[in-house]
Amino acid sequence: MLTELVITVSLLAAPAASSAPPGLAELSDSAPTANAAAEADMETMLNSLEAPIDLHQVDAFVEAAGELHMQIDYHIALGHVTIATRMDQDGTGVARLTLDQRVLAEQKFVDGKVITESTAFGALTEEEALLLVASVYQVWDHDVVIKALAETRGLLCGLAAGISFLAISAGVIAGCELATSGFGTAACVTLGAGLGKETGAIVHDKCGKAQN
């Protein structure tokens, strides 16, 4: 049951703004064409998510007795970020990404399966969306998070990958549509989904190594 679940992400933003990873508008010299641009920009976009950003006051814990609860807190230029998940033994729960108490992405589960999902990244700028998803991608490399994951086995790696897929897909799609008017919704979805899948697999691998 629980091995099929994805996750809950919550982000509480504070003020300020620092340099975000390279924007999608910088990935092409001219208005790109749909599928060709999405494929060409995939590796460049992944590299931008890996450009180091500052993560401050990182804290993490996992509770797996009865109900599963995982939570990661940290601060970036946008504010206070929390990644958390709660799932009961029957696989019922909710996964969320919120910024400044606004829900940006949400998945609800029953019996370990997604029954509803939604995203709302429209209130963010391109730079904010990309900084946020880069932080979600990079926090799994932090020593505090690695230590928390190392004390658990199996399940948490799937959840970590699910959080990253959800947040990065939605954030990249939103940033893409804001930054590249000529890109087109279909190509932005292709880019976002592709990046979400690739980064999710990378996060799963990072988590697995932390547990070994």
Image: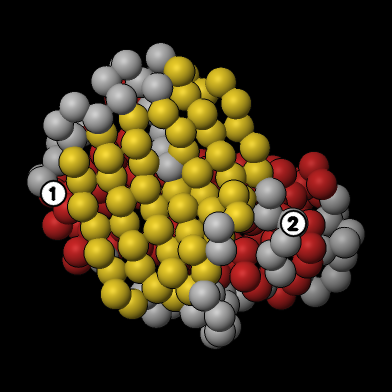
**Tag 2 or tag 1, which sits nearer the N-term?**
2
Q: Residue at x 27, y 40 (%)?
A: 69
Q: Amino acid at mark 1?
A: Ala
Instruction: Tell me how the rendering is colored.
Output: secondary structure
Q: Residue at x 54, y 54 (%)?
A: 98
Quarter of the image holding residue 29? Answer: bottom right
User: Residue 23, relative to residue 85: is it above or below?
Assistant: below
Q: Position of residue 174 (x, y in %)?
A: 71, 55
**Residue that carries the numbered disc 1 in the rendered image:** 150
Task: Give the residue furthest to the front.
Answer: 101
Residue 138 appears anywhere in the view: yes
Residue 176 appears anywhere in the view: no
Q: Determine which of the numbered discs, if any, sits on residue 89 in the image.
A: none
Q: Nearer the viewer, residue 12 or 28?
A: 12
Q: Position of residue 56 (x, y in %)?
A: 33, 77
User: Residue 24, relative to residue 207: is it above or below?
Assistant: below
Give me the C-alpha separation between circle 1 and circle 2.
36 Å
Q: Residue at x 75, y 71 (%)?
A: 25
- The secondary element bearing badge 2 is classed as loop
- The secondary element bearing badge 1 is classed as helix
Q: Position of residue 141 (x, y in %)?
A: 28, 62
User: Residue 180, relative to residue 42: is it above or below?
Assistant: below
Q: Quadrant of the N terminus?
A: top left
Q: Position of residue 88 (x, y in %)?
A: 31, 25
**Between marks 1 and 2 in the image, the one whose residue lies nearer the viewer:** 2
Q: Amino acid at mark 2?
A: Gly
Q: Residue at x 85, y 50 (%)?
A: 184
**Residue that carries the numbered disc 2 in the rendered image:** 122
